[in-house]
Amino acid sequence: MIEISELVKYRRSIRKFLPQVVEPEKIDTLLKSALMAPTSKNSRSWEFVVVDDARLLQKLSLSRPMGSTLLANAPLAIVVLADPSKSDCWLEDAAIASAFLQLQAQDLGLGSCWVQVARRPHNDDITAEQYIRELLQIPGELNVVNVIAIGYKDEERRPYDEAKLAYDKIHRNQF
Ligand SMILES: Cc1cc2nc3c(=O)[nH]c(=O)nc-3n(C[C@H](O)[C@H](O)[C@H](O)COP(=O)(O)O)c2cc1C
């Protein structure tokens, strides 16, 4: 167990993964964290698709012309879906669960990266969301927000340097 202040400092987007599979217990811990994320009015407007099939991961990596290629070498992906009929805060709910997944991954010694799906094209004809909906047989009423790629790290990323944080973004009492 690592302190949260260390987790947020050391979590960096990881785009290269070892072929090593993520153990079922770790996947379970990841999913528990997502399911404990706060949601507006406790609506739990999200759904998650766990993908560990190499063929599907390869196809998911083609969701976007760029930006999703890293999924080809990830042993695990969690597709984050949201149901707008359950909450008008579906996007916020999904984003928070995604962040929980990324921090939990770091705590388990795993790397992760957010792959954006919502509002991104697959090609000139269809969206990345339509492509993934078809690939994973996702019901039409659910929105595909992102895919969180997860696995053992095959790259080193430096933690955030606290001295170099964008403190100019912080305003006190008045902007
Ligand atoms: C909403 C959102 C969308 C992102 N989309 C992608 C993406 O499609 N592909 C990708 O490789 N990284 C993506 N990222 C990761 C960001 O590039 C990364 O978080 C940012 O550069 C900061 O680096 P860090 O995560 O190492 O702190 C996304 C992150 C967020 C929060």
Image (spheres, rainbow, N blue to C red):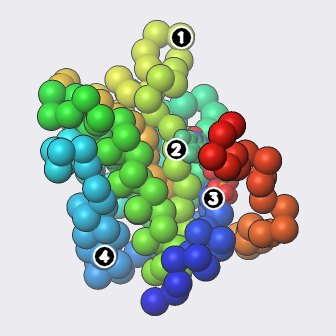
Mark 1, secondary structure of its residue? loop
Q: Is mark 3 within 8 Å of ligand 1?
A: yes
- Work out how far the residue at label 1 is from the one at label 3, CA to CA, in angstroms: 28 Å
Q: Which residue is mark 3?
A: 13
Proximity of marks 4 and 3: CB atoms separated by less than 8 Å: no
Q: Which residue is mark 4?
A: 29
Label 1 vs 3, first from the N-terminus? 3
90 over 156 or under it: above or below: above
Question: Which of the pair 167/20 is nearer the observer?
Answer: 167
102 over 156 or under it: above or below: above
Question: Which of the pair 171/88 is nearer the observer?
Answer: 171
Q: Is residue 71 left or right of residue 129?
A: right
Q: Which residue is mark 2?
A: 115
Q: Position of residue 9 (x, y in %)?
A: 65, 71
Label 4 vs 2, first from the N-terminus? 4
Q: Which residue is mark 1?
A: 124
- Work out how far the residue at label 4 is from the one at label 2, CA to CA, in angstroms: 21 Å
- Work out how far the residue at label 1 is from the one at label 4, CA to CA, in angstroms: 38 Å
Residue in the picture at 78% in, 59% down: 165
Mark 3, secondary structure of its residue? loop
Label 4 vs 3, first from the N-terminus? 3
Residue type at mark 3 is Ser
